[in-house]
Image (cartoon, rainbow, N blue to C red):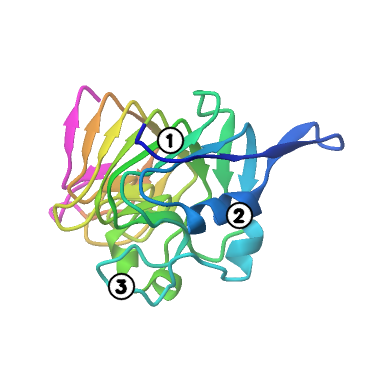
Amino acid sequence: SFAGTLRPVSSTFDDATQTWIGNVTELTNALWTAAEGDEIVLARGNYDLKDLAVNGVLMRAADSTSYSPAGAILDIRQNKMTLRGETGDPRDVVISVSENPGYRILGTTKSTVSIRDLTMTGGKSTASNCGAWNYRGGGAIGMQGSPVVSNCVFYGNSSPRHGGAVSGLNGRSGKVIDCVFYGNNGTLGDGDGGLAGGYSTFVNCVFTNNVTSAAEGSYGVGVVCLSVLTNC
């Protein structure tokens, strides 16, 4: 943790579905107003970003420069920030997009950022909504900076290139530790990895049933491209 303000985000129990529903408004407000070093802690629940995605309400606009993770619904805007789940079990805190016209879940251009103890699903970067940054991948997280992502689960995310789930850019990428990737899809061209790519380092990660249509002999075939894997 960094030396900053603790910013809790609440959830409520829905009797009809017998599930915890995360407060998306509190989450976006916390990200908008956070200062350097703050820690945003998400209570148990599902934080469905559907309404933001359908209405194109983005923290980082789709027309951002090609060197920013454009088309991101959520954005970590300060250095030395933490975004994490409250319980320490990534299955308890889910950030999802149940209806998504083509936006990534999270973007960050900041360094020394910690993202942990979360599940992310339903992220989708596309050329129409994420501009030039779509081909750099990252349906769940687009990284232009050096975040550390740990103890997270990524499933059901997609991108045309360079990683359906997580991707870095131009050597300034993050480290991904103790994470699980399954059912992610890198759908199109240039042989880019099906779930994770772009100069990232992966340590103690598990990859299962991820898909790519990458062509052999280009930037990389399979689930990971242009990255370093250790004990995966």
* Magenta stretch encompasses residue 176: no
Q: Main secondary structure of the magenta part?
A: loop
In the picture, measured across the screen, residue 153 lies left or right of residue 94, that is left
Q: Position of residue 120 (x, y in %)?
A: 49, 42
* Magenta part of the chain: 216-232
Which SS class for mark 2?
Answer: loop
Q: Does the rendering let one see residue 222? A: no
Residue at the disc numbered 2: 49
Choose mark 3 or mark 1, whichever is in front.
Answer: 3
Query: For the residue carrying disc 1, how many other residues have a C-alpha within 10 Å: few (<14), some (14-19), or many (20+)?
Result: some
Residue at the disc numbered 3: 132
Which corner quadrant holds the C terminus? top left
Q: Earlier in the sequence, mark 1 or mark 2?
A: 2
State the separation of the CA atoms marked 2 and 3. Answer: 23 Å
Residue flagged by tag 1: what amino acid is it? Answer: Tyr
Choose mark 2 or mark 3, whichever is in front.
Answer: 2
Residue at the disc numbered 1: 182
Q: Earlier in the sequence, mark 2 or mark 3?
A: 2
Which corner quadrant holds the N terminus? top left
Q: Residue at x 21, y 51 (%)?
A: 198
Choose mark 1 or mark 2, whichever is in front.
Answer: 2
Q: Quadrant of residue 13?
A: top right
In the picture, measured across the screen, residue 198 lies left or right of residue 183, that is left
Q: Does the rendering let one see residue 19? A: yes
